[in-house]
């Protein structure tokens, strides 16, 4: 059965935001798995990874999530931020889990900022 979507009915921004969200997740996981003692993780590299994650997170937060998913996603991000560092005490894999969850918490926190920006813009648009 053919899809009901045509080329003109698919907007660029939601598709780009979906890819931005997936790219942010992948970058967060890979960056979190790298030990902090790696010699190539200079301050400049860490700064640029943060910038990339911020841009991807804002893009994903503003255009990727539907309004029905906002509350669920915000609760997920809060839970990850609160409990993400608790895995650091697990032997052997704890540092890797802690690094991944810490980086994911940063990325998902920026996505929540994007969702908040969308809410504020929609709120002001209703009054204009």
Image: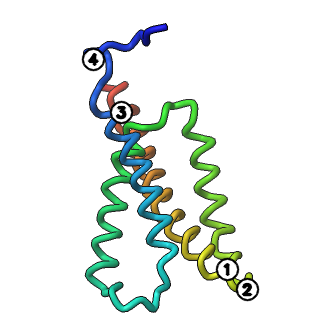
Where is residue 105 drawn, in percent x and y?
53, 64
Lower position in the chain sequence, tag 1 or tag 3 = 3
Dot 1: element: helix
Dot 4: element: helix
Q: Tell me the tag on residue 94.
A: 1
Q: CA distance from mark 3 to mark 4?
A: 14 Å
Q: CA distance from mark 2 to mark 1?
A: 5 Å
Picture residue at 27% right of the left edge, 30% below the top: 12
Q: Given contact means CB atoms under 8 Å apart, are the residues at marks 4 and 2 in contact?
A: no
Q: Tell me the tag on residue 91.
A: 2
Answer with the quarter of the image where residue 27 lies: bottom left
Where is residue 56 drawn, in percent x and y?
34, 53
Q: CA distance from mark 4 to mark 2?
A: 51 Å
Dot 2: element: loop
Where is residue 4 drawn, in percent x and y?
42, 9
Lower position in the chain sequence, tag 4 or tag 1 = 4
Name the foreground residue: 93 vs 16: 93
Quarter of the figure with the C terminus: top left
Q: Given contact means CB atoms under 8 Å apart, are the residues at marks 2 and 1 in contact?
A: yes
Q: Is residue 128 left or right of residue 108?
A: left
Q: Tell me the tag on residue 7.
A: 4
Q: CA distance from mark 1 to mark 3?
A: 35 Å
Q: Which residue is mark 3?
A: 14
* 100 up-or-down from 117: above or below: below
């Amino acid at each position: 059965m053919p899809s009901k979507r045509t080329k003109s009915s698919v907007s660029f921004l939601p598709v780009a935001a979906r890819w931005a969200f997936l790219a942010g997740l992948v970058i967060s996981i890979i960056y979190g798995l790298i030990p902090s003692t790696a010699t190539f993780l200079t301050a400049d590299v860490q700064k640029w990874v943060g910038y990339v994650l911020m841009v991807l997170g804002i893009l994903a937060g503003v255009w990727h999530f539907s309004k029905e998913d906002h509350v669920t996603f915000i609760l997920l991000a809060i839970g990850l931020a609160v409990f993400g560092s608790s895995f650091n005490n697990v032997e052997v894999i704890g540092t890797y889990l802690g690094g991944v969850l810490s980086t994911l918490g940063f990325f998902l926190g920026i996505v929540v900022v994007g969702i908040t920006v969308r809410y504020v813009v929609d709120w002001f648009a209703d009054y204009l």
